[in-house]
Image (spheres, helix red, strand yellow):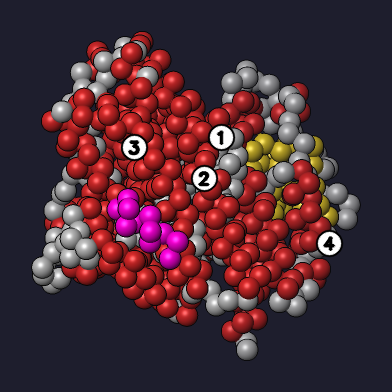
Amino acid sequence: MMRRAILYFEKWLIYSVIVGIATALIIVLFYKLILSTTTFFAWIIGTTDNPLVPCYNDFSLAAINSTNKLLIPVSLLIGTVIGGLIVYYISPEAEGPGVDATIEAFHKMGGIIRSRVPFMKTIASAFAVGSGCSGGLLGPSVQIGAGIGSLVADTLKAGFHDRRMFLVAGMAGALSAIFRTPIGAAIFAMEVLYQRDFETRAFLPVIISSLTSYTVSYHLIGFTEYFPRIDVELPVLYNVWSFISIILLSLFATPIALLFNISFVKSKDFFEELRMRLGMPRILKPILGVSLLAPIGIMFPEVLGSGRGFLNSLFTEITKNPIIIENMIIYLAILTALKIIATCLSIGSGNSGGVFAPGLYIGALTGLVYAYTIATKISALHPIIYAYISMAIVFGAISKTPLATSIMIGEMTNNYHLIVPSLLASTLARELTGTITIYRSQKVSIIKHSLQVLETVLSKVKSKGINTQDIKAKDIAIKSIRPLNAKKRLSDIIEYFNLNVYGIIPIVNDKGFIVGVIDATQYYKLIELPPHLTLESVDLEKPVIVSEDDSIDDIVDLMVRYNRDYVLVTSHNNIYKGVITIDIILSTLLKIVYEKETKR
């Protein structure tokens, strides 16, 4: 067992370092391309004289300083057309934010992403966001990193489980490089796949990949502070009144987060339904979107691009003169609403870009409005602290990633003291928003998601003309899992369980009939009981049992019906024969499909 654990660590140490280096290199390229495209489009609108010397990392600041804002529509149109041609004629998977497509690839495609996707996503997103479309870099980075992870998995001919781990490791590496958030990126990659769960099996790959990518990218492009650090005294941050104020902030910002979430999802549906109704080419969706965005961009250039440049300039002004915003509350509220609209018209219409940056922008302005209208009467916290915590609230709520977002905000603001209050507020917001999420491909939890994936894969296999009724339980059962006699004592199960890599112990009587099962959940309950008790004297988990002649269709139906990720197999005379898990079924189905495809 120890040898197996060492080999597992060594394997993922090597693989994760490879993924981390690869994702760092392409994300550095992506970052450089963003600088170049943003500067080029800044030149188009008259903000800079030399388009060949990168000097802008966000279009919002370039647009604000533009000497000819009437050329903003030209910038938007050029970027959208170039990005649209790439997305809709070369790599359709690169449409929109990219996180949803990545989550779907993890859950439903076995971690498979076409090799062209990360490279096409890099170019399309750089032109879309660089030209002024209201979007961010998290979504594209996630898909780029996942694509690189999938490409490495292809090269190494990884199996089903490992392939998905490569994908998640790529996500973490990419986010770590682009945002300089090694810990938050690793947590995000595990957390964003589910609404209320973590892909903990990927812990080792994501941590190593994230730290590797962070180190490599640091040496290539250095460290730049994403948002300015605001020093805060801990007695002020952690006193009762501050926490009351932060909880009220969560209640204040949650409706704004819901508005953004619902508006964005509805906008995606609207543009797709409009395209289908009019029968127009897909590329016209984003062109129509930016055409509607153009007049808003001319009048309110602050809402274009990721908005990071505008936010940083705003934060700088506030640190110099905190009362300067008091007369701008209505203006900030208007910008918040317009940023939601701009993101819906940009990314909701099909442009390639993320929703993380818009979420932070909306959260920051919401936090400032709250700070100057309510919070100053309750707590002495700096207004920008509320802006940072509100960022975590808005995006943590809509993405169902309160832990990851809170840590990322702490890393991006270089203030880890903000993690605890951010986590408190964003978790409350996550609970208040329920199951509403901006990422439709998310699953609720690992068990339920596994069963849903199983059904999806089985359906796709059937659609290829494969008769799954011919696949019987006896053909795929794991026969190496030995049962334990019910007369054994509880003290006997500890060593036995530690030697069982599947975490499943069938319990049988003297005749070989199944009388129960011990899985990981029940194991930890049983070891708390007196060790001299026998297994037959305690309440054992009742397993789902199938016959060795049952088809894979029957097995999946039973798993879904009883919400189990494994079943026990018996012979015709009810003698225990083996165990079937979800992973075994998925591996079998994918192998059958692969063999059929290679014979063509």
Q: Nearer the viewer, mark 3 or mark 4?
A: 3
Q: Residues within 10 Å of mark 3 (few under 14, many from 20)?
A: some
Q: Is residue 292 magenta?
A: yes
Q: Quadrant of residue 170?
A: bottom left
Helix, strand or loop at disc 4?
loop
Give the crowd class for mark 2: few <14, some 14-19, many >=20 residues within 10 Å.
Answer: many
Closer to us: 182 or 397: 397
Q: Amino acid at mark 1?
A: Thr
Alpha carbons under labels 1 and 4: distance apart: 46 Å
Q: Are marks 1 and 2 in contact (CB under 8 Å)?
A: yes
- The residue labelled by disc 2 is 261
Q: Is residue 158 above or below residue 557?
A: below
Q: Residue furthest toward the right? A: 573
Q: Nearer the viewer, mark 4 or mark 2?
A: 2
Could you tell me the amino acid type at mark 3?
Leu
Residue ID for mark 3: 332
Q: Which residue is painted at 50% across and 73% down in the image?
A: 284
Amino acid type for the residue under numbered disc 2: Asn
**Helix, strand or loop status at disc 3:** helix
Query: Disc 1 or disc 4, which is closer to the eye?
Result: 1
Disc 3 or 2, which lies upstream in sequence?
A: 2
